[in-house]
Amino acid sequence: MDFNFSVFSFLLLFLTGLVAGFVDSIAGGGGLISLPVLLSLGIPPQIALGTNKLQSSCGTLAAAANFIRRGTVDLNQCLHGIVFTFMGAVLGAWTIQQIDAGFIRHIIPVMLLFVFFYTLFSKDLGTRSGHAKMDKNLFFTLFGLGLGFYDGFFGPGTGSFWTGSLLIFMGMDMTRAAGTTRIMNFTSNVVALSVFIIGGNVLYSAGICMAAGQVIGARAGSGLAIKKGASFIRPVFLTMVFLTIVRLMYVNYV
């Protein structure tokens, strides 16, 4: 299928990537912005999903690199999580091709509601580092496999689950949790992107144009998150979790 986009369409894609990258690097949920725009341009859903993974992978890489470069996150401390997230995402990407994902769509909004209200009513959550409730390696083994599988299998809300889990179980502050989330998101995104590429479901012209905006937005957003900390990240995080819940409820029940 050929897509002859106008100059205006490419400008729209670039600006969408810019905004999505900015938001996603802070709190996740950039797909809520980018995917509807891709679909509005007449791109078939499967190709839109693959193209979205291409541009979001570039954004999460740029944001993760910025968090690492500024010393907010130590990549060596994340290696265990990267390995198990990769394994989980491969398994999830394989599984989604074997069975229907319909049943999980009804569970995810409920789980996200828990993350939303727990964060909303825990006023000090993420304002400073606290005590971890789990061993680090055990946490990254369980959540790497589980959330990696989920991202490869279905995807929406993965960043929110990662950030919420890091805040609740590992006692991280908001900034470090946001940085660690970007690293894990990039890992599972690359796996999902590989599946879409193999299936021929990536529109490179649109994806690369959006990716250029994503990189700029992600660097700006992650820089602000590092500079301003929890007071800036928390409201953006809560907003994006809420919007993700609304979107999933709409898709499932309307």
Image: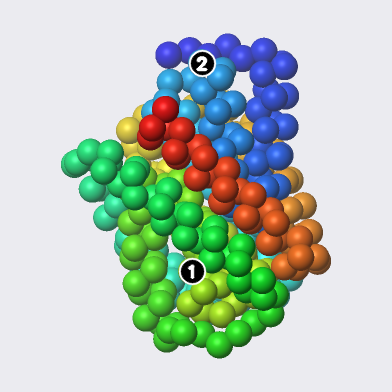
**Quadrant of the snapshot with the N terminus:** top left
Circles 1, 2 touching at the beta carbon (< 8 Å): no
Image-based side of 129 in relation to 100, left or right: right
**Quadrant of the snapshot with the C terminus:** top left
Q: Estimate the x, y position of residue 49 in percent, counting from the top left.
A: 45, 33
Image-based side of 113 in relation to 72, left or right: left
Q: Nearer the viewer, mark 1 or mark 2?
A: 1
Which residue is painted at 61% across and 71% down in the image?
122
For marks 1 and 2, give the CA distance.
36 Å
The quadrant holding residue 174 is bottom right
Q: Mark 2 — residue?
A: 42
Which residue is painted at 72% across and 16% down in the image?
8
Q: Estimate the x, y position of residue 188 in percent, counting from the top left.
A: 43, 55
Q: Mark 1 — residue?
A: 165
Q: Estimate the x, y position of residue 73 in percent, counting from the top left.
A: 63, 73
Q: Estimate the x, y position of residue 80 in percent, counting from the top left.
A: 42, 75
- The three-letter code of the residue at mark 1 reads Ser
Dot 1 or dot 2: first in sequence order is: 2
Answer whether residue 56 is visible to the viewer in this image: no
Answer whether residue 148 is visible to the viewer in this image: yes
Q: Looking at this rendering, what residue extends furthest in the left direction?
A: 98
* Image disc number at residue 86: none
- The three-letter code of the residue at mark 2 reads Gly
The quadrant holding residue 193 is top left
Residue 6 lies, with reference to residue 19, above or below; the image says above
Which residue is painted at 43% across and 84% down in the image?
134
Image-based side of 235 in relation to 133, left or right: right
Q: Looking at this rendering, what residue extends furthest in the front direction?
A: 121
Which residue is painted at 51% across and 85% down in the image?
132
